[in-house]
Amino acid sequence: MRRYRIDEKEISEINITPFTDVVLVLLLIFMIASPFLVVGALKVKLPEASTAEPINDNKNVELFLDSANKLYMNGKYLSMQELIIQIQMKLQANPAQGVVIKADKEVFHGNFIKLLDELKKVGVTKFLIGATKRND
């Protein structure tokens, strides 16, 4: 009796289902964690004032001065020279534009005054100083 051998091919595939599961879990973790990373990026503790009022104007430029005397505009660190150039460009577009300075309560008075002086030299005429509302 003759035996016939059936030519069987091995079927080999890459199963990407576990890989897809891992990628989706990582995506969810990053989506949940990313807002916490962005919010905690600028550590500026504003001083408290009982007469503080909210600013509803989005037309102003927001500057942050942290306790290490680093300047930030739009969440990006800038040196004083870079800041001056950016402010000059914004003032060319809108000369009446104001600047909101949100300085940490630990910033030395002299550093704050130096920032005000540099901004005034550039031509900024409207200053707003950031504070948090004190609950008395």
Image: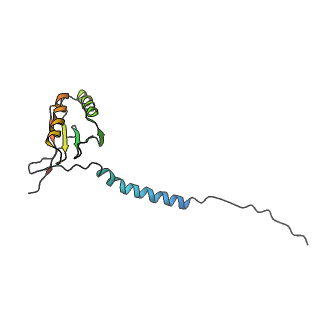
Which residue is drawn at the image coordinates 32% and 50% (left, top)?
Answer: 38
Quadrant of the image containing the N terminus: bottom right
Residue at the far right: name it: 1
Q: Position of residue 78 (x, y in %)?
A: 29, 37
> With respect to residue 63, does 14 lie above or below?
below
Relative horizontal placement of residue 109, taking residue 26 as reference (left or right)? left
Q: Residue furthest bottom?
A: 1
Nearer the observer, 30 or 3? 30
Percent of width and height locating residue 49? 10, 50
Number of marks in the rendered image: 0
The structure residue drawn at horizontal position 74% and vertical position 61%, both measured from the top left corner, is 9
Left or right of 2? Residue 121 is: left
> Which quadrant, please, contains the C terminus?
bottom left
What colour scheme has been applied to the protein in the rendered image? Answer: rainbow
State the residue lying farthest toward the top: 92
Q: Which quarter of the figure has residue 14?
A: bottom right
Residue 95: image location, x then y, percent: 20, 28
x, y percent for residue 71: 25, 40
Residue shown at 30% from the left, 49% from the top:
41
Above or below: residue 24 compared with residue 74: below
**Vertical relation: 92 (above or below) 114:** above
Say left or right for 15 vs 2.
left
Q: Quadrant of residue 3?
A: bottom right
